[in-house]
Amino acid sequence: MPRRFLKTLKVRVRGYFFAGLLIILPLGITVYVITAILKVMDHVLDIIPPPLHPQTYLPFPVPGLGLILSLLLVVLTGMLAKNYMGRRVVDFGEHLLSKIPLVRPIYSAIKQITEAMFGETQAAFKRVVLVEFPKQGIYALGFVTGTAAAEIEERTARNLVSIFLPTTPNPTSGFYLLVPEKETVALSISVEDAFKLLISAGIAAPGDNHSHLPPGVEPPNGRLMQPVLREGDGSRS
C-alpha cells in the first residue's frame, strides 16, 4: 500500500509540476523578452549626441521616450525601405550579412519567420485548405491565393484554385499547385494560426494548447483533446 501510494503521489506531483511549468515558463519568457526589448529601446537615447538629446531640453524625464523614438525609427525605416533607393540599400545590406558565416543563418531564420508572420504576402492568402499531397491519403496545409487563369480552366475543363503549399519550418518557400476546388478540404483556422502551425511543425496546433502535454498531465478541463485530423476524415467540401 505505501509503495502504491508513493507511486500515485509521484505521478500527481509530476503532473502538477509540468502543468505549472507550462503556465509559468511562457509567461516568464514573455515578460523577459518584453522587458529586454523595452530596455533596448530606452538605450536608443544613448546614441543621440548630448546637445541633441531630448532630455537636455526637458525640465523632467519623460517615461517611455525611448519607446516612442524606437517606434518612430521603425516607421522611418519602413518608409525608406518602400522606395527604390531604400530597397537597394536594404538589399545591399542583406547581401553583406549573407556573406558572414555566423550571422547568415541567424538573420535568415529570423527574417523568414518575421516575413511569414507580418509580411505583406500573408494578406494575399484568402483561406486555408487541406490538399492531398504528395499522394492520396496524405494531407498538406495550403493557402488559396485565387482562381486559375481562364485558359487553364478551359484546357482542363475543371474549376481550379491556385494554392501555395509552404514547406516546414520555413514557410517562405514551397510549391505552387493548381487543384480542383472540390478536392480541397476547407479549414476554419486563420492564416496566422496556419503559419504558427507550419513554423512549429505541428506543435502549436490552433485551438489546442494542451495536445502535447507530458505524460501524467491532464488538460485543465479534464477532457481528452481531439486530434486535428481524425483517421478516415477524407470528406470533401
Image (cartoon, rainbow, N blue to C red):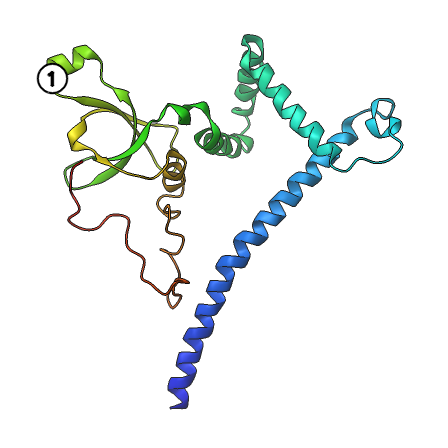
Local SS, label 1: helix
Image position, residue 130 (x, y; %): 24, 36
Q: Residue furthest bottom?
A: 1
Q: Residues within 10 Å of mark 1 (few under 14, many from 20)?
A: few
Q: What residue is shown at x 16% (from left), y 32% (from top)?
A: 183
Give the quadrant of residue 150. top left
Picture layout, residue 19 above or below residue 182: below
Type of amino acid under label 1? Thr
Picture layout, residue 29 above or below residue 130: below
Q: What residue is shown at x 77% (from left), y 30% (from top)?
A: 45
Q: How many marks?
A: 1
Pick the residue in front: 208 or 4.
208
Q: What residue is shown at x 18% (from left), y 51% (from top)?
A: 231
Image position, residue 110 (x, y; %): 50, 34
Give the quadrant of residue 159. top left
Left or right for 23, reference 199: right
Give the quadrant of residue 178. top left
Left or right for 1, reference 153: right
Q: Label 1, on which residue?
A: 156
Left or right for 31, reference 1: right
Image position, residue 129 (x, y; %): 26, 34
